[in-house]
Amino acid sequence: VEFAGIVGMLRVAFETIEGSDSNLRDSPAGDFYVARVDGVTPASVHPFADVRTRVLTNWRAEQTDTALGNMADAAAARVNAGEDFTDVAAELGRIVRLTPRALTRSGSTEVFTNGALGQLFNASAGTAIASEVQLGASYVVARVTAVQAADPTAAPENIATLQAQFDQNLSNEVIAGYVAYEQEQVGVRINEEVLNQALNYQGP
């Protein structure tokens, strides 16, 4: 049975009244099935003793992320206030590195997210910004060293490509903003049981 079919069966099972059978259903793979519900286990909150380790791990990760974000913001603020970038980095046990090549608006890397690139391209030369890195639970503090103006004589196809990339990035930002707004207004509830079943599914 394909995974999509199993997801369908789970939904049907949760919609079926205890002690009864569902109607005959077909899966996306073309299989037919009937779900019978013999019993329903009421939802319950796990005892704190059972989830204490997970809660503590998540809390520590959240606190660490907040602390790192505050350190990065403070470092960027110090650089923008006139302190030497190299000295600030040294106090934090880091060294300043130059990017191997000039960054582009759509050139996200393992370090620079699209959000970080947006900040950099909206900043003037000499300005520092702080942002989460693309991969890994960390932050980057970056400073604009130079701004290279776009070539107005660029080939039309290059301009069209840049416009398409800009439109896509703008669309992604609008969608991300809408999703964040809806999550804040409606709230998000994760069904851990179904999520774990999906993540642990090994195939037929």
Image (cartoon, rainbow, N blue to C red):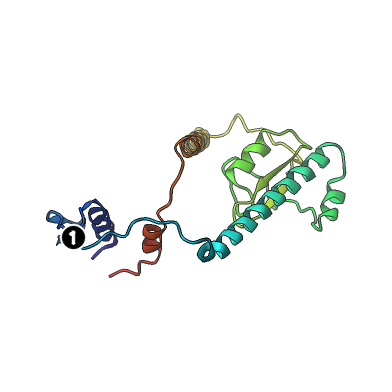
Q: Which residue is mark 1?
A: 35
Report whether residue 122 is seen.
yes
Q: Identify which residue, 177 or 169, lies in the foreground.
A: 177
Residue 192 found in image quarter: bottom left
Q: Is residue 107 left or right of residue 22?
A: right
Q: Is residue 56 left or right of residue 125?
A: left
- Taking the spot 15% from the left edge, 60% from the top edge, the residue there is 34
Q: Identify which residue, 91 or 160, lies in the foreground.
A: 91
Q: Position of residue 197 (x, y in %)?
A: 36, 63
- Taking the spot 31% from the left edge, 68% from the top edge, the residue there is 203
Quadrant including the N terminus: bottom left
Determine whether 160 is above or below 67 in the image. Answer: above
Q: Is residue 27 left or right of residue 149?
A: left
Determine whether 89 is above or below 168 in the image. Answer: below
Quadrant including the C terminus: bottom left
How many C-alpha atoms fall within 10 Å of the one at disc 1: few (<14), some, or many (≥20)? some
Q: As drawn, which residue projects farthest toward the left?
A: 24
Q: As drawn, which residue projects farthest toward the top?
A: 152
- Taking the spot 60% from the left edge, 40% from the top edge, the residue there is 105
Mark count: 1
Q: Position of residue 200 (x, y in %)?
A: 39, 67
Determine whether 38 is above or below 148 in the image. Answer: below
Amino acid at pointer 1: Ala
Q: Identify which residue, 52 or 173, lies in the foreground.
A: 52
- Taking the spot 43% from the left edge, 48% from the top edge, the residue there is 189
Report whether residue 104 is seen.
no
Q: Secondary structure at mark 1?
A: loop
Q: Position of residue 21 (x, y in %)?
A: 14, 58
Q: Position of residue 199 (x, y in %)?
A: 40, 63
